[in-house]
Image (tube, helix red, strand yellow):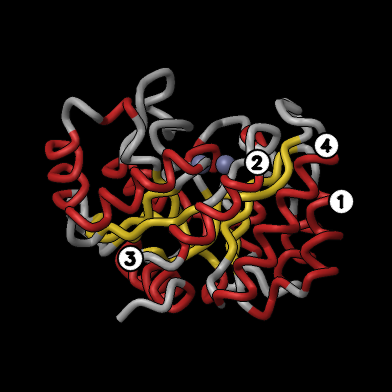
Amino acid sequence: MNEAELFDTHAHLHFPEFADDLSAVLERARTAGVGRLVTIGTDVETSAAAIALARRESGVWASVGIHPHDAEAADEAAFAEIERLARAPRVVAIGEIGLDFFRNLSPRETQERTFRRLLDLARRLDKPALIHCRDAHAETLAILAEVGVGQTGGIMHCFSGDVAIARRCLDLGLTISLAGPVTYPNARALPEVARFVPGDRLVVETDCPFLPPQGHRGKRNEPAYLALTAARVAGLRGEPLAAFGAQASDNARRLFRLD
Ligand SMILES: [Zn+2]
Ligand SMILES: [Zn+2]
């Protein structure tokens, strides 16, 4: 493959699913053109693991945060530790953080409180926020507007809304990230979103090991498959894959303050 330079803005490479063959996974990623990625923490333990991986592997950076599913388990010590980890080298963002009213694994109030605290951390450290939002667009966008997320910037990861929601995210200063679901035959509004978002506000991700693109569904996702998602988005936009990949990578590097 290797037709394009690609940046996977959201992976969980330090998760146990990759423990046995991580070097082969990274090798396949590089062969597919995915030379840079951010591996994303979801609680204290996985945030520390993300940093450890980023320190070992070139082209890998880390993000630290508390996922809405894990909000209820986070005590004061956890917030203090996330803040300490956020200042470590190779940490380029705060996330993933946000609201998930689909699974509701933590009470909504706890999710909102955790989300606000970590948005405040992102503001204080001037790092972009990586936002998880499922079945909670109204509440998530209200909080993001209130805190002025545009100051630090951020990514709506695995964007699942429609064009109207995408427009509101752009108005708040956010970048939109498309993942594997844009390749699915039942992708609903996502193809329209892929065409709508301006080229300088769009990035791509795998969210691996979750959400593999069409052709790999039901299996473990990995960064190499980002090429399939990127090709689909480029095709929807009527752009050559290489040009789309280069611009999306530039967007990611700018947002993460790399180079
Ligand atoms: Zn997520
Ligand atoms: Zn994720």
Identify residue for label 2.
Answer: 75
Which comes before the other along the chain, label 1 or label 2? 2
Tell me which amino acid carries mark 4.
Arg
Q: Give the foreground label among 4 and 2.
A: 2
Q: Give the foreground label among 1 and 4.
A: 4
Identify residue for label 1.
Answer: 138
Distance of label 4 from label 2 (alpha carbons):
16 Å
Q: Are the two marked residues, 3 and 4, in contact with CB atoms closer than 8 angstroms?
A: no
Q: Is residue 173 above or below residue 206?
A: below
Q: Furthest-top residue in view?
A: 218
Q: Give the foreground label among 3 and 2.
A: 2
Distance of label 3 from label 1 (alpha carbons):
32 Å
Label 4 SS: helix
Identify residue for label 4.
Answer: 108
Tell me which amino acid carries mark 3.
Arg
Disc 2 residue crowd, few under 14, some 14–19, many 20+, Cα 10 Å: few
Q: Is mark 1 within 8 Å of ligand 1?
A: no
Q: Are the two marked residues, 4 and 2, in contact with CB atoms closer than 8 angstroms?
A: no
Identify residue for label 3.
Answer: 90
Q: Is mark 2 within 8 Å of ligand 1?
A: no
Tell me which amino acid carries mark 1.
Ala
Distance of label 3 from label 2 (alpha carbons):
25 Å
